[in-house]
Image (tube, rainbow, N blue to C red):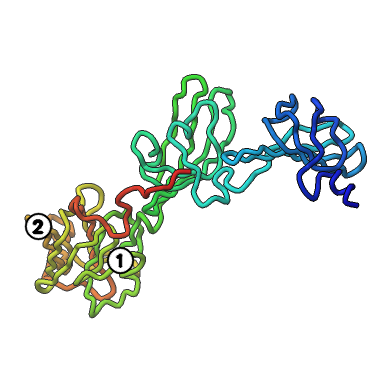
Amino acid sequence: MKGFIQNAGLGGFSNRTVSSANWNEITETGIYHAETQNQPELPAAVGGLIVLNIVTGIYITQLCMRSNSASPQMWRRSKDTNGWGAWMSVMLAGDFGIGSATGVARSDAELTAPDGVPGGLFRQSGSVGLSNLFGSYGSGICMPHAMSSAGTSRLSTFLFMQANGQLKTKWQSVNTSTGEVSGTVHTVYSTANTTKASDGALKAASPVARIASPESTDRLDIDESDFEWCGYGVANGEARGVEIIREDVGVYRVTGAKSLASSGWRLLPPRDPDGSGDLGVVTAEQLDDEIIISLFRRKMVLADGEIVIQSGESIDVPANSWIDIRLDMPESVIAPDAPTEEPQIQPE
């Protein structure tokens, strides 16, 4: 029995050294050690071979291993009545970024290579011009599609999650002759980059605050997601440092922000969550280091045969709503949960 086990290459070091120049002829079940690692039909220089003889001489499977601590690899192939099939790579833990503690680092050049974009899970460091294809550090997945119908470009799809929680997508085409890359990075709207106005409508978000009374509001959703109370209202993560103070009936002072947003929407009046429209007229006055927000009752005036909405008496924010303000923050103010620099990754 011991001799049989040893002859099969089991129970210790293999004594079945492969000297044949043609591994197609090795069909007997056992574990082998290659005398030379340069066989013509092998996928790479390998040192070990396992042969599984399922049905004598007809259905056979071979497994071969590369003995390299820096780059271990394994391949398999099978033989049937039609002969030997091609060697196929066996996926190991860490291949394509799957099963490893650290994702596979991919540079911009690798992800836009004309000769083929590597599929699988990957990470980027956010280093501008080198590893910053999606505008920030984070992790993603690349799904190579195919060659274009004209046969001139390689097509790929990307999903990439930035460290700030924003999801990016890209459909990419790379010209195989010129290397020209086309495709736009798009942002997926989510709670990471949108806010819900007082009437429930979604708005693109950046630093955003909501003015409402902490004592009288009956809106349970006012401090949803990352909004936190900051005096007479709440602010999201990008607006940390903002403070809202009620100065008088319908008058609120906002400090800690640079100004109202310089682009996009800036100020929204309280709106009826049941859909009946605006619940007041809101104005803003920019001072040196603060913003004064004022709220008035809506007054309808007939002028030149038209109904014009004007400001009436000052009112506080209704309990069933809030005032939305979108801000620009000082450069020195960074949300505590926002990434400030790329993390230090241990070399792989």
Alpha carbons under labels 1 and 2: distance apart: 23 Å
Q: Is residue 233 above or below residue 69?
A: below
Q: Is residue 122 left or right of residue 320?
A: right
**Of pointers 1 and 2, the one earlier in the residue sequence:** 1
Secondary structure type for disc 2: loop
Secondary structure type for disc 1: loop
Seen as rendered, the residue at the extreme right is: 56
Q: What residue do we see at 24% from left, 79% from top? A: 216
Seen as rendered, the residue at the extreme left is: 288
Residue 129 in picture, x, y percent from top left: 35, 34
Seen as rendered, the residue at the extreme bottom is: 215
Q: What residue do we see at 60% from left, 48% from top? A: 93
Of 230 and 210, the residue lying toward us:
230
Dividing the picture into quadrants, the one containing residue 58 is top right
User: Is disc 1 surrounded by few (<14), some (14 to 19) or many (20+) residues within 10 Å?
Assistant: many
Of 20 and 204, the residue lying toward us:
20
Q: Is residue 153 above or below residue 223?
A: above
For label 2, the residue is 289
| Kind of residue at disc 1 | Phe
Q: What residue do we see at 52% from left, 41% from top? A: 142
For label 1, the residue is 227
Q: Is residue 44 above or below residue 217?
A: above
Residue 106 in picture, x, y percent from top left: 47, 38
| Kind of residue at disc 2 | Asp
Q: Is residue 328 visible?
A: yes
Dividing the picture into quadrants, the one containing residue 74 is top right
Q: Is residue 301 visible?
A: no
Residue 280 in picture, x, y percent from top left: 20, 66
